[in-house]
Image (cartoon, helix red, strand yellow):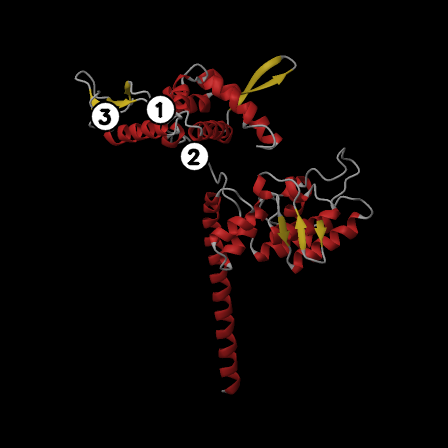
Amino acid sequence: MARPSKHDGVVYRRKDSNIWWMRYRDNDGSRRLESTHTEDWQEAQRQLRERLRARDDNTLHIVRKGEQLTFGEWADFFLENYSKPPFRAAATHVANMKAMRTLLPAFGCLKLVEIEGALIEAHLRRRLRQGRRVHRKAGVVEIGILKPTTVHQEFRVLRRVFNVAVKKKLCPANPCATVEFPARLRGLFRPHYMTWSEQMRIEEHAPAYMRNVIRIITETGLRVYKELAVMKKEQVDLLNKVAFVADSKTPTGVAEVPLTDIAVHAFRSQMELAGPSQWLFPSGGSRTGHQVEFKGAWHTTLQRAGVRYFRLYDLRSTYATRLSAGGVADEWVTQMLRQSDAQVFKKYSQMKLQMKREALTKLNRQTNESNLRASSDTEECA
């Protein structure tokens, strides 16, 4: 009878190396010796625990498969199964395909576990020094240097690809987590909080339908193009003050959305403007029959109002910020946004600070007005 093993698994160093190795028993009792590819003892212990957990869950063969999988093979699988609708929007799939044109030549032949943060940073630095290539009649020409935002978009796609690989236990950790983007990005992905005074000024210079768009999004948090632009009249129940979202970016986005009185008034106004059309925002020049973009009208409205440009999508962020500032718990705000990831709420913290500053400004103005009235009353009495 075989003697029972004293330890379930151990990490150790070989005499000629500083790299930690791990030794453990497979499901059939076979002894396994594998390198952890790290000099950090705690990281080696974490990898050993992952191995033992995968063994106990009968998923060890999947983990080992990930170690033999190249980035190119996984990228093809990712694009086919996790990039197309209904998992992601069609525009997101197009962006992923575009980013892969530069990522595959750089990492395609490497194993997933061989790609490290240093390799990714070196690739990003090379991309930031490259010129922007465009197709002309004379052929492909370079115009200037690539913008940091373009390179960062490719980095975001790479990070998303590895996030899915980590969830599928194909690699132990996302190497992008240790990468510091080697360029400064001004205000990237920081949503703009629209103050009440800005909203009043924008609505004053906006056409009627755009005014309805502003009020609906800031009162409901609907996504601009995926939910509001494609909405039909039959999806809005003004009597019960609810709108039904039939299709959304995520499965949690398909839900009934409660309406405030302001939102009900805006929906009723838009239904009158839409006339006999089934769409809330009809468009005779569109093949779909409804509006497909508001960017032109939005940009013109901001120019007339004298407000610095910000994205129309930021009105959804404004909705979340006002909920949070009104005392609604962050967990409930996440549910009202119909987000599947609670971490998305972190980006609203800066906007809450702006709202506090706006409140302090109002408080100071009211205090000054009270002091002025008090001083004028004293002078009259004297």
Q: Secondary structure at mark 1?
A: helix
Picture coordinates of residue 112, whole percent (x, y): 41, 21
| Earlier residue among tags 3 and 1 | 3
Which residue shows up at 33% across the image and 29% down it?
50
Q: Tell me if residue 56 comes above or below residue 205 in the rendering.
A: above
Q: Secondary structure at mark 2?
A: loop
Q: Tell me if residue 57 comes above or below residue 256 in the rendering.
A: above
Q: How many labels sit on residues?
A: 3
Q: Which mark is residue 118?
A: 1
Nearer the observer, 196 or 3 = 3
Left or right, 287 with respect to 262, comes to right
Circle 1 residues within 10 Å: few <14, some 14–19, many ≥20: some
Picture coordinates of residue 26, whole percent (x, y): 31, 22
Which residue shows up at 22% across the image and 28% down it?
7
Left or right, 21 with respect to 275, comes to left
Q: Tell me if residue 74 comes above or below residue 284 in the rendering.
A: above
Residue at mark 2: 184
| Earlier residue among tags 1 and 2 | 1
Residues at badges 3 and 1 in contact (C-beta under 8 Å)?
Answer: no
Picture coordinates of residue 150, whole percent (x, y): 51, 28
Q: Quadrant of residue 85?
A: top right
Nearer the observer, 162 or 273 = 162
Residues at badges 3 and 2 in contact (C-beta under 8 Å)?
Answer: no
* Residue type at numbered disc 3: Val
Picture coordinates of residue 44, whole percent (x, y): 27, 28
Q: Residue furthest top?
A: 138
**Is residue 207 among the parts visible in the rendering?**
no
Circle 3 residues within 10 Å: few <14, some 14–19, many ≥20: some
Q: CA distance from mark 3 to mark 1?
A: 25 Å
Q: Which mark is residue 11?
A: 3
